[in-house]
Amino acid sequence: MFYVYILRSVGDPEQHYTGLTDDLRARLAEHNAGRSAHTAKYRPWILVSYTALPNRERAAAFERYLKSGSGRAFANRHLR
């Protein structure tokens, strides 16, 4: 399984991050440990939502959609 996830910064709740992984717990720990340059500044992070998909291609397509304009609107209404 592959997971598309949305994180919210605890210190700055307006900051969100959308990502893709095959190990959700380990990836969240990496974000909170500051091992990702894109998320280190706003840590700690909490998991807001995730979607499990059967293969990397579908997960990557869904992640790209969530990072698009209409995908962000969808996430704001339904996932955050």
Image (cartoon, grey):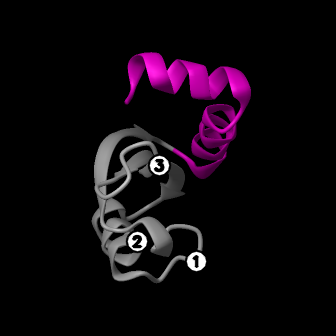
Image point (54%, 19%), residue name: 74
Residue shown at 62%/39% (left/top)? 58
Q: Which amino acid does label 3 sit on?
A: Gln
Q: Do the residues labelled 2 and 1 touch (CB within 8 Å)?
A: no
Q: Nearer the viewer, residue 55 or 61?
A: 61
**Disc 3 or 2, which lies upstream in sequence?**
3
Label 2: how many Cα within 10 Å (few below 14, some 14–19, many 20+): many
Which numbered disc covers residue 31? 2
Image side of residue 29 versus residue 27, left or right = left
Q: Nearer the viewer, residue 10 or 3?
A: 10
Q: Which residue is drawn at 58% across and 20% down?
A: 73
Where residue 41 sits in the image (x, y, percent)? 48, 72
Which residue appears farthest toward the front when viewing the image? 12
- Asked if residue 12 lies left or right of residue 58, the reply is left
Using the image, tell me which numbered label, if any, was put on residue 37.
1
User: How far is the residue under mark 2 from the one under mark 1?
Assistant: 9 Å
Q: For mark 3, what is the residue?
A: 15
Please tell me how crowded label 1 is: few (under 14), some (14-19), or many (20+) other residues with Cα within 10 Å: few
Disc 3 and disc 2 in contact, CB within 8 angstroms? no
Q: Report the number of numbered marks.
A: 3
Distance from the alpha carbon under mark 3 to that under mark 2:
13 Å
Q: Say which quadrant the C terminus sits in.
A: top left
The numbered mark, 2 or 1, whose residue comes first in the sequence reads 2
Segment colored magenta: 55-80
Question: Residue at the location (64% across, 46% down)?
Answer: 60
**Main secondary structure of the magenta stretch:** helix
Amino acid type at circle 2 is His
Q: Position of residue 46 (x, y in %)?
A: 27, 54
| Distance CA(mark 3)–CA(mark 1) | 14 Å
The residue nearer to you, when weighing 9 against 20, is 9
Instruction: Reply above or below: 52 against 80.
Output: below
